[in-house]
Amino acid sequence: MEIDKKIEKFITSHHVLTLATATTDGYPYCCNIFYAYDKASGAFIFTSDNQTHHTQMMLQNTNVAASIVLETRIVGKVQGLQITGQIKEATENDKSIYIKRFPYAAVANLQLWRLEADFMKLTDNTLGFGKKLIWQK
Protein backbone atom coordinates (compact mmCIF):
# COMPACT_ATOMS: atom_id res chain seq x y z
CA MET A 1 0.00 0.00 0.00
CA GLU A 2 1.36 3.40 -1.00
CA ILE A 3 1.93 5.96 1.76
CA ASP A 4 -0.62 8.79 1.62
CA LYS A 5 0.91 12.04 0.31
CA LYS A 6 -0.48 13.93 3.33
CA ILE A 7 1.47 11.62 5.64
CA GLU A 8 4.65 12.11 3.60
CA LYS A 9 4.16 15.88 3.54
CA PHE A 10 3.87 15.90 7.34
CA ILE A 11 7.00 13.73 7.70
CA THR A 12 9.09 15.89 5.37
CA SER A 13 8.00 19.13 7.03
CA HIS A 14 9.57 18.05 10.34
CA HIS A 15 13.04 16.86 11.35
CA VAL A 16 12.81 15.53 14.94
CA LEU A 17 11.04 12.40 16.10
CA THR A 18 10.66 10.79 19.50
CA LEU A 19 11.93 7.22 19.40
CA ALA A 20 10.58 4.74 21.95
CA THR A 21 12.63 1.63 22.66
CA ALA A 22 12.23 -1.26 25.09
CA THR A 23 14.47 -4.02 26.32
CA THR A 24 13.44 -7.61 25.71
CA ASP A 25 11.96 -7.67 29.24
CA GLY A 26 9.84 -4.59 28.51
CA TYR A 27 11.82 -1.79 30.21
CA PRO A 28 10.89 1.37 28.19
CA TYR A 29 12.91 4.44 27.21
CA CYS A 30 12.52 7.30 24.75
CA CYS A 31 14.74 9.91 23.12
CA ASN A 32 14.49 12.67 20.52
CA ILE A 33 16.48 12.34 17.32
CA PHE A 34 16.97 14.20 14.05
CA TYR A 35 15.87 12.16 11.02
CA ALA A 36 15.90 12.18 7.27
CA TYR A 37 13.11 10.44 5.39
CA ASP A 38 13.67 8.03 2.50
CA LYS A 39 10.54 8.38 0.34
CA ALA A 40 11.52 5.40 -1.81
CA SER A 41 11.43 2.95 1.10
CA GLY A 42 9.39 4.85 3.72
CA ALA A 43 12.28 4.57 6.20
CA PHE A 44 13.43 7.13 8.75
CA ILE A 45 17.23 7.51 8.77
CA PHE A 46 18.96 8.71 11.94
CA THR A 47 22.30 8.70 13.67
CA SER A 48 23.02 7.37 17.12
CA ASP A 49 26.24 6.23 18.71
CA ASN A 50 26.45 2.58 19.74
CA GLN A 51 27.13 3.61 23.34
CA THR A 52 23.84 5.47 23.88
CA HIS A 53 21.20 3.93 26.10
CA HIS A 54 18.56 3.81 23.36
CA THR A 55 20.94 2.19 20.86
CA GLN A 56 21.85 -0.49 23.37
CA MET A 57 18.11 -1.10 23.80
CA MET A 58 17.54 -1.16 20.01
CA LEU A 59 20.21 -3.83 19.70
CA GLN A 60 18.36 -5.96 22.28
CA ASN A 61 14.91 -5.40 20.77
CA THR A 62 14.61 -4.03 17.23
CA ASN A 63 10.85 -3.40 17.55
CA VAL A 64 10.31 0.30 18.22
CA ALA A 65 7.67 3.01 18.19
CA ALA A 66 8.08 6.67 17.32
CA SER A 67 6.10 9.88 17.08
CA ILE A 68 6.36 13.22 15.33
CA VAL A 69 4.19 16.06 16.55
CA LEU A 70 3.38 19.61 15.57
CA GLU A 71 3.39 21.70 18.72
CA THR A 72 0.36 23.96 18.76
CA ARG A 73 -2.28 25.19 21.16
CA ILE A 74 -4.80 25.64 18.35
CA VAL A 75 -7.07 22.58 18.30
CA GLY A 76 -7.83 22.98 14.59
CA LYS A 77 -4.13 22.69 13.75
CA VAL A 78 -3.30 19.59 15.84
CA GLN A 79 -1.21 17.08 13.90
CA GLY A 80 0.73 14.06 15.08
CA LEU A 81 2.13 10.89 13.61
CA GLN A 82 2.53 7.59 15.46
CA ILE A 83 4.85 4.97 13.96
CA THR A 84 5.82 1.39 14.66
CA GLY A 85 8.55 -0.57 12.95
CA GLN A 86 11.90 -2.28 13.03
CA ILE A 87 15.40 -0.87 13.44
CA LYS A 88 18.00 -1.98 10.91
CA GLU A 89 21.53 -0.87 10.13
CA ALA A 90 21.65 1.85 7.50
CA THR A 91 22.68 1.27 3.92
CA GLU A 92 25.26 3.28 1.99
CA ASN A 93 22.40 5.10 0.22
CA ASP A 94 21.00 6.11 3.62
CA LYS A 95 24.16 8.08 4.36
CA SER A 96 23.67 10.27 1.29
CA ILE A 97 20.00 10.84 2.22
CA TYR A 98 20.96 11.88 5.75
CA ILE A 99 23.78 14.18 4.65
CA LYS A 100 21.55 15.81 2.03
CA ARG A 101 19.10 16.70 4.83
CA PHE A 102 21.83 17.65 7.34
CA PRO A 103 24.91 18.77 5.34
CA TYR A 104 26.95 19.55 8.47
CA ALA A 105 26.86 15.82 9.30
CA ALA A 106 29.24 15.13 6.39
CA VAL A 107 32.23 15.85 8.65
CA ALA A 108 30.99 13.66 11.52
CA ASN A 109 31.72 10.01 12.20
CA LEU A 110 28.17 8.76 11.78
CA GLN A 111 26.64 5.53 13.05
CA LEU A 112 23.45 5.52 10.98
CA TRP A 113 20.31 3.47 11.52
CA ARG A 114 17.00 3.15 9.73
CA LEU A 115 13.55 2.75 11.19
CA GLU A 116 11.58 0.70 8.67
CA ALA A 117 7.97 1.56 9.39
CA ASP A 118 5.26 -1.07 9.28
CA PHE A 119 2.45 1.17 10.58
CA MET A 120 1.80 4.92 10.59
CA LYS A 121 -1.21 6.85 11.85
CA LEU A 122 -1.49 10.58 11.23
CA THR A 123 -4.02 12.49 13.29
CA ASP A 124 -4.68 15.73 11.39
CA ASN A 125 -7.29 18.17 12.63
CA THR A 126 -6.70 20.40 9.58
CA LEU A 127 -8.64 17.73 7.64
CA GLY A 128 -11.45 17.64 10.22
CA PHE A 129 -11.56 17.17 13.98
CA GLY A 130 -9.87 13.89 14.93
CA LYS A 131 -9.32 12.88 11.28
CA LYS A 132 -6.91 9.96 11.03
CA LEU A 133 -4.99 8.65 8.04
CA ILE A 134 -3.59 5.13 8.46
CA TRP A 135 -0.90 3.33 6.50
CA GLN A 136 0.07 -0.27 7.16
CA LYS A 137 2.66 -2.36 5.37
Image (cartoon, rainbow, N blue to C red):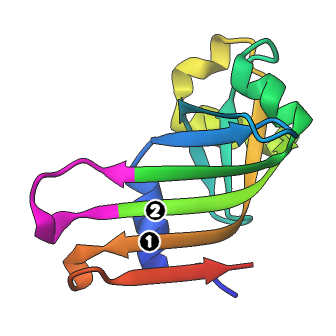
Give, as a three-letter code, the residue at label 1: Leu
Residue at x-position 36% and y-position 52% = 69
In the figure, is residue 122 to the left or right of 47? left
Q: Nearer the viewer, residue 74 or 44?
A: 74
Q: Which residue is mark 2?
A: 81
Residue at x-position 68% and y-position 64% = 42
User: Which quadrant holds residue 41?
Assistant: bottom right
Q: Which residue is mark 1?
A: 122
Q: Quarter of the image containing the C terminus?
A: bottom right
Give, as a three-letter code, the residue at label 2: Leu
| Residue 59 image point, x, y percent | 88, 32
Q: CA distance from mark 2 to mark 1?
A: 4 Å
Name the element at disc 1. strand
How many numbered discs? 2
| Residue 113 image point, x, y percent | 77, 37
Q: Nearer the viewer, residue 33 or 63?
A: 63
Mark 1 Cα shell of 10 Å, populated few (<14), some (14-19), many (≥20): many
* Magenta highlight range: 69-79
| Residue 3 image point, x, y percent | 59, 78
